[in-house]
Amino acid sequence: MSTWIGETFTSDVGWNHLEKLVGIGTRMAGSDGEREAATLTRTALSDAGARNARLETFDVQGWTRGESSIRGERSSLSPGLEHASIALPRSPSKTVTAELVDLEYGLPGSFAETDIDGKIVMVRSDVPDHYERYVHRREKYYHAVDNGAVGFLYRNHVEGCLPPTGSVGTPAAPIGEIPALGVSSELGARLARRFDGEDIEISVEADIGGATSQNVHAELGPDTDERILVTSHVDAHDIAEGALDNGAGTAMVVELANALAGREDDLETRVEFVAYGAEEVGLVGSEHHAEQTAHDDIVAVVNNDGVVGDRTLSLISHGFDGLESAVETISERYDHPIETDPGLGPHSDHWPFVQWGVPGYHVTSTSDDVGRGWGHTYADTLEKLEKRTLREQAVLLTELVVHLASDDATIEHRPPEAIAADLEDQGLAEGMRITGDWPYDRDGN
């Protein structure tokens, strides 16, 4: 056992792949850079020892960023702050002029309580401490749409002149209804102070058309029908290196393949590695995979999206008792802290499987902050991460995957209606319905 631990803790395989990913430039869904990243990942998985490394392509809604702007009619926004706004991906290419309304946190009730018909709405990217759940960007956007807003500004709560990005659109209508821009905390404060209740102009230019993305697949272990999925997403928003979100997750998948190749005889169930495309624009790659594969054969999904950002792993286990106990086993075996959260997290590439009752983790790392921090901003860069953290977490996750692949692990699937009921109980169903992500009928089936 100690040999593989030492090799993993001194390995540069995952980190070297991370450096290659952040060096590509844009990895936006459907771009040449995303395909280059997928091809590099296929090669890295093959070099690590995984077999049948391959790309599987699928169609995706294309969206390429053009110019965007915010202008006030009464006075300028202030020198140096104009740069602190960016179009949200899949925003329509459109210019509107209307009264600005600052809804602060943009909690669901505030949209109905305020007259926003025909106006431009601005909301923050966080929620107050007293609110019972996180309200996702897309939920706030569609509350604005449904209540008649003609424009949407998404204000970062993290200071530093960093506008946040993140897509809009629904599965049925990939391009959003109203133009949407992310603005920095500082620009948002100035807009609220000087233009709340007055007309502003917001403009988005984008090239919208068809595109192609791809998922990367490779395998290790015995040729069983049952399998463990070890996943990440290879795409990233086009404004940054995407080191944390999600170069680190894909680097972790490669590092796990490297470690598990040396422990292949310990695997009693096949392990399939998948690096998804087009996650940032609506989980398109994982949805494609979930539609094409048999769910009953999947023992568990180990989805890496948010690893390496902090020292301690945090695994959302979605109410699956077997997943919770598996983490406890590994934590006790190594006398090492691993946080777990039994709640539901309907965002990232585990969800197209978990929503139908397939056991799945969202593997991330602890943070006391609300939201993504540097993620989805220009500041998502390599120097925010540490090689030591990648290696340490790879040791724990390697052992977890081996345990999940053993006959000792018992992980029961859950009925979809139980997942639907939990979404209702945890206050998540409302947001999923308004964003078009609710997959169930009224009975949860």
Image (cartoon, rainbow, N blue to C red):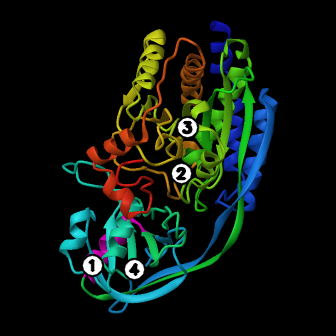
Q: Is residue 14 left or right of residue 77?
A: right
Magenta stretch, residue numbers: 183-196
Q: CA distance from mark 1 to mark 4?
A: 10 Å
Residue identified by numbered label 3: 304
Q: Is residue 7 above or below residue 20?
A: above
Amino acid tagged 1 = Val
Q: Nearer the viewer, residue 114 or 352?
A: 352
The image position of residue 389, as x and y in percent, is 54, 29
Q: Of callouts 1 and 3, which one flags the residue occurring earlier in the amino acid sequence? A: 1
Amino acid tagged 3 = Asn
Q: Residue at x 50, y 56 (%)?
A: 376
Camera-nearest label, 4 or 2:
4
Quadrant including the N terminus: top right
Amino acid tagged 4 = Gly
Camera-nearest label, 1 or 3:
3
Residue identified by numbered label 1: 101
**Residue 151 got which mark?**
4
Q: Of callouts 1 and 2, which one flags the residue occurring earlier in the amino acid sequence? A: 1
| Mark 2 vs 3: CB contact within 8 A | no
Residue identified by numbered label 2: 380
Q: Of callouts 2 and 3, which one flags the residue occurring earlier in the amino acid sequence? A: 3
Rate crowding at label 2 as few (under 14), some (14 to 19) or many (20 or more) other CA atoms within 10 Å: many
Rate crowding at label 3 as few (under 14), some (14 to 19) or many (20 or more) other CA atoms within 10 Å: many
Camera-nearest label, 2 or 3:
3
Q: Of callouts 4 and 3, which one flags the residue occurring earlier in the amino acid sequence? A: 4
Q: Residue at x 43, y 49 (%)?
A: 372
